[in-house]
Amino acid sequence: MINFNVPPFTGKEMEYMKQAVDAQKICGDGAFTKKDNAWLENKTKTSKALLTTSCTHALELAALLANIKPGDEVILPSYTFVSTADAFALRGATCVFVDIRPDTMNIDEKLIEQAITDKTKAIAPVHYAGVSCEMDTIMDIAKRHNLIVIEDAAQGIMSTYKGKALGTIGDFGALSFHETKNYSMGEGGAILISDPAKVEMAEIFREKGTDRSKFFRGQVDKYTWQNFGSSYLPSELNAAYLYAQLELADEINEARLHVWNKYYEGLKCLKDAGKIELPFIPEGCVHNAHMFYIKAADIKERSELIAFLKANNIMSVFHYVPLHSAPAGQKFGRFSGEDVYTTKESERLTRLPLYYGLKDEEVDYIIEKVKEFYNVH
């Protein structure tokens, strides 16, 4: 069976974890966490990167830093993972869902402005598949309406928009290092902070509401409870595991892009024949090959395709069920305008196996079987 996903592993993970154990420092903010933060800051050119226990927690931190409160509204796509909405629902805000673009599956930037009310506090664009939203337009809208932008860049590490790293264009960005992502620490994430003035409060929220980070830097002689907060620090063991992959980030990225390009070239004949649709990369966007998907004609054809591939020992999967159709989505949010593409396009999409270490012959076999399903050779 060709798995849909295999978590990345470079070979140094166990060695680095042992170093953390030998240093007798396995709780948060040890040497490897600092290395990860520094790597992220250098790579993304953000003011500050802070490793978190998950991308979910990075989004929650961003919502806290944005001072999202009950009665506020946050605009986001319905086609996203629940964490994007949870971060704001937890603060008592209403999630205002906007339709997506069918070409990128990202929020339709042209529909954001009509969703704005006097209660709107923030926009949360989601960079689906590591392909950027139309950020110039979104940032212009935010500036004109005095809104905060929180980028859900869970899938966007190593991707850029007009030369800028995803997660660094808005006020805050959230990255994921879950086992399904390009670089993994099992469970983990990071918050990227554009404004240096927000860093101290981020550290306080992240450290249970205390100024413990300042204490460890020798800036205060004791740490105390300063504000509410939670424990958003990942274990040093997780941070050590991640660093082994960040060291080889370019190599892993190139390997994934190789697979993505191989899929695209191999399946282009089906696209040209009108059988399927393939991912679209807008001008100015550099993606990270986070996923490769194809779009079937409808949900029936997609279900048959997934079953056919499984019968041929290939695991393929669909993706998000739109949040506005879920019980919690109806409780904590509303859809602005008409759902023209969100549901229809989500029901057509199938993700093919893509991970570091996937062999060329396996990719060739998958391409062959997809062509066989569509009776194109």
Image: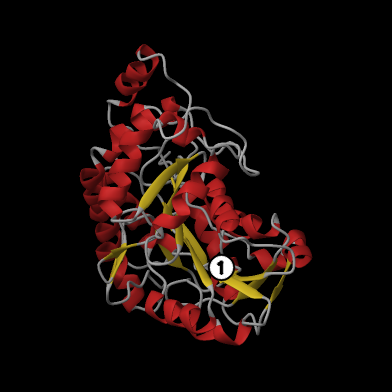
Residue 178 in sight in this render: no
Looking at the image, residue 292 sits to the left or right of residue 341; the answer is: left
Q: Residue at x 48, y 24 (%)?
A: 27
Which of the image's four quarters has the C terminus? Answer: bottom left
Question: Residue 75's spot in the image, x, y percent?
Answer: 60, 72
47 relative to 252 in the view: left or right: right
Q: Residue at x 55, y 50 (%)?
A: 61
Res 342 quadrant in image: bottom right
The answer to which image quadrant residue 33 occupies is top left
Q: In which quadrant of the rendered image does the N terminus lie?
A: top left
Amino acid at circle 1: Ser
Residue at the spot 33% in from the left edge and 38% down from the top edge? 36
Please identify the quarter of the rendering in which residue 219 is found. top left
Residue assigned mark 1? 346
At a point 74% along the width and 63% down the height, the residue shown is: 70
- Viewer-proximal residue among 171 and 11: 171
Residue 368 visible here? yes
Relative to 327, is 245 above or below? above
Name the element at disc 1. Answer: helix
Locate residue 278, reporting x and y percent: 37, 70
